[in-house]
Image (cartoon, rainbow, N blue to C red):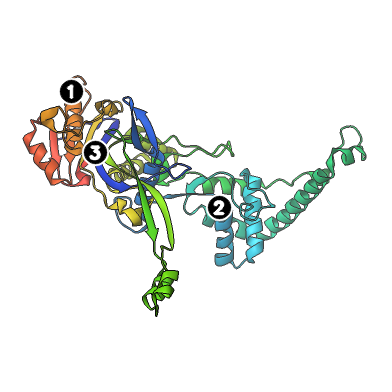
Amino acid sequence: MTEPPRSQFLSLHLIETLAAVLPVRDENAQPKTLVFGGVERHMITSQARRRAERIYARDRANAGRGALKGRSMGVRTREWALLTGRELESSYGWDKEKALVTARAVLEASGLKFGDPSKTTVANLTRVLVFAPSDAAARIAEHVAGRAEELTEWCDAYLAAQVRAAEKKSRGKAARKSEPQADGEQAEDDKLPPLSKATRDAVLLAIAPRDAVDIALYGRFLAEIPDSPNVDGAVQTGHAFSVHESEQIEDFYAAADDAKLDRKRNALDFLDAADDAGAGMTGYQSLISGTFYRHTVLDRHQLRVNLRVAGMDEAEAEKAASEAEKEFVNAFVEAFPEAKKNSTASTGSLPALVLAFEGERPYNYAAAFQKPVDEGPVPTGGEGPAGPAAVRRLLRHHSFVSRRREDLRAARLLTYDPEIDALLGELDLPESVAVVERAEELTP
């Protein structure tokens, strides 16, 4: 029996309950919020979620685990000049300073902009994060090392021209006016020598998306080099938000000074002990608790387009896309932003419910929670604990929508909560909804 063709979009919806965590914060170290349904809600931004999922999948692939093991993955960083310089130094024996200067000049002449050269902290960092395959630095270094003599000579001329240009600029307009040039004449010494086409092409190929699967999934935008291909991501991610009104905890903490306490413990009289009284440091941290709804969509068609454009043939793109979908679903379930992971153990959370289904368009069920959940007692008009209440709302919303939308395919449910598992047994779920036990079963 042949399976029916899969729909273009895979929609994933998740309910999770978190206690005393701070997965993401604003510039003032406060929890992020949004107003929805007339009340303030806690928010975990899509950027935080996407990065957590991307890094989770990348680390598993690099460690030889998961559906994408052995696949090429990407790195998003401003340190490509540093990475290329280290590669020239370690693999080809270049002098450390020469390697870094050459790497920076080659990347800059290719179109990437760098930080202020007078500030050592940013001089060798690109102004924007560049999302490129993880082996981009090694590829660039290999090309530079293969043309060492040519590029060393070019780099010396490039740096000398930069120095002359900087000196001329520092003299100011008045000084330049005192040295008039003939009409149409321009000092050739001021011009930066162009990078050879072969080297620039090698750089653009190295930083091109190529077969990096996470770039095909999440996309990238590199405006600084117009002829370097950008990628429309195949993944759409919504901001997670609490299904009820937000409540914030201001946690006062006191950190002990071990040396001070040791002196106090060994003090010979109460006056010595009093000198070492008090905490070593005190402060406040903001924490949040609540039940959250989050949502993401995979565009299967866009994913395959991205992989084909990157150079894969149809069969290879189909295989890579299938593996990417499995790992994407797994990362959506397993990954979590790592802010304060040690002090709150937030990364140990597991979802109360995951709902997965296919359709010919994305489906966002945020409207199911526009009215905030009232956690008051059921006999007095409340809905009880937010976790089970949110599960009921989400499934009721999906059942209602699926009766009116012919494109929705069979849904799958996964829970890691025994109480929610019992609740699913009590609910009158339609035959098209299947309960599964593993994340990999959420997608066919």
Determine the secondary structure under disc 2.
helix
How many neighbours does mark 2 have within 10 angstroms: few (below 14), some (14-19), or many (20 or more)? many
Q: Quadrant of the C terminus?
A: top left
Q: 140 left or right of 364?
A: right
Is residue 330 something that shows in the picture?
Answer: no
Identify residue for label 2. 80
Disc 3 to disc 1, how far (Cα)?
A: 18 Å
**Residue 354: % across, % down:** 22, 39
Determine the secondary structure under disc 1.
helix
How many neighbours does mark 1 have within 10 angstroms: few (below 14), some (14-19), or many (20 or more)? few
Say which residue appears at 13% left-offset and 39% top-offset: 435
Identify residue for label 1. 400
Identify residue for label 3. 15
Mark 3 residue type: Ile
Mark 1 residue type: Phe
Q: Earlier in the sequence, mark 3 or mark 2?
A: 3
Disc 2 to disc 1, how far (Cα)?
A: 50 Å
Say which residue appears at 78% left-offset and 44% top-offset: 191
Q: 77 left or right of 419?
A: right
Q: Earlier in the sequence, mark 2 or mark 1?
A: 2
